[in-house]
Amino acid sequence: MKKMYLISVFLLLTIMTLSLSLPVSAQDKETKPTELIVFAAASMTESMNKIAEMYKEVAPNVKIVYNFDSSGTLKTQIQEGADCDIFISAGQKQMNQLDIDASPEDNTEKLDFVLQDSRFNIVENSPVMIVPIGSTKDIQSFEDVMTDKVEMVALGNSDVPVGQYSEEIYTNLGIWDALNAENKISFASNVKEVLAQVEAAAVDCGVVYSTDASTAKGIKVVAKPPKDSYKEIKYPAAIMNHTANLEAAEAFVEFLKGPESTKILEENGFIIPEN
């Protein structure tokens, strides 16, 4: 009798152990957070942070980790092996350089980082001329950089999209070479640095995206460039083909395309393109 009792107790304890250990293991697997690394152009900082906060309610087990910088810097980091699940560039050039399906003239190194069929244009933007709040220089146009009103203008350098767009505008206006020759340019590594120089009144004016200007407090917009002086500014986004979190990346991309995200992007001054 005692032997049967001990066997029954042993079986009961075994069943209890199994019933407790299996669900806990499954629960751990379900609740283990997925870290999704998103490289995004610096001009998207405010919008993407808001979207990440909203996404917590949709996917509480997914942690969005951002790396904000110039698109050129982000592209180089990806090329050199940095962990990145999704890349959002402020220029087509940087994405093309990583996309094997892009023109060989753009992807000269035949790099293959973009997941096929995942690329789309997430937003459009436009450049503007800004000056510090309280400026008395009466700067009213992009062309004013060549007048006595401007001693120094802040522009992105040639490695970043905002700098490339600025150079394109001034080249088409016929004053890029003269502007360089007079050493009037304070080059910045990304659009946020341009903004910071103008806000600090370290320069007389600068060229940033309209979205950056819309969220800044220490500057005012004084001019837009002629429409035919630059190409459309469309930001491409894509999943990287080396991602270890494909399902989570695809879900977040769908959220970026959805109404909640587009509302935030539009509130921050972006235009949603037709893909």
Image (cartoon, rainbow, N blue to C red):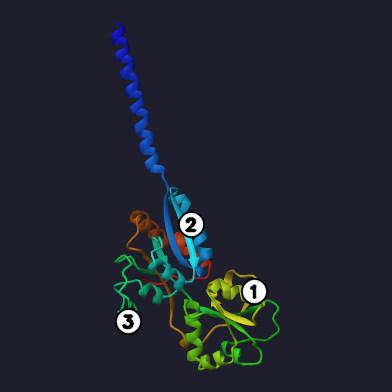
51 on left or right of 243: right
Q: Which residue is mark 3?
A: 105
Give the Cα distance between marks 3 and 2: 35 Å
Q: Position of residue 178 (x, y in %)?
A: 55, 93
Nearest to N terminus: mark 2 or mark 1: 2
Nearest to N terminus: mark 1 or mark 3: 3
Tell me which amino acid carries mark 3.
Glu
Front residue (pair 150, 107): 107
Nearest to N terminus: mark 3 or mark 2: 2
Say which element carries label 3: loop
Q: Residue at x 63, y 77 (%)?
A: 198
Front residue (pair 20, 209): 20
Q: Which residue is mark 2?
A: 52
Q: Quadrant of the N terminus?
A: top left
Report the mark closest to the observer, 2 or 1: 1
Tell me which amino acid carries mark 1.
Glu
Q: Quadrant of the C terminus?
A: bottom left
Say which element carries label 2: helix
Answer yes or no: is residue 122 visible: no
Report the mark closest to the observer, 3 or 2: 3
Report the mark closest to the observer, 1 or 3: 3
Give the Cα distance between marks 1 and 3: 38 Å
20 on left or right of 159: left
Q: Which residue is mark 1?
A: 199
Mark 1 burial class by Cα count in 10 Å: few <14, some 14-19, many 20+: many
Q: Quadrant of residue 124?
A: bottom left
Q: Position of residue 76 (x, y in %)?
A: 42, 70
Count the marks.
3
Q: Position of residue 89 (x, y in %)?
A: 43, 70
Say which element carries label 1: helix
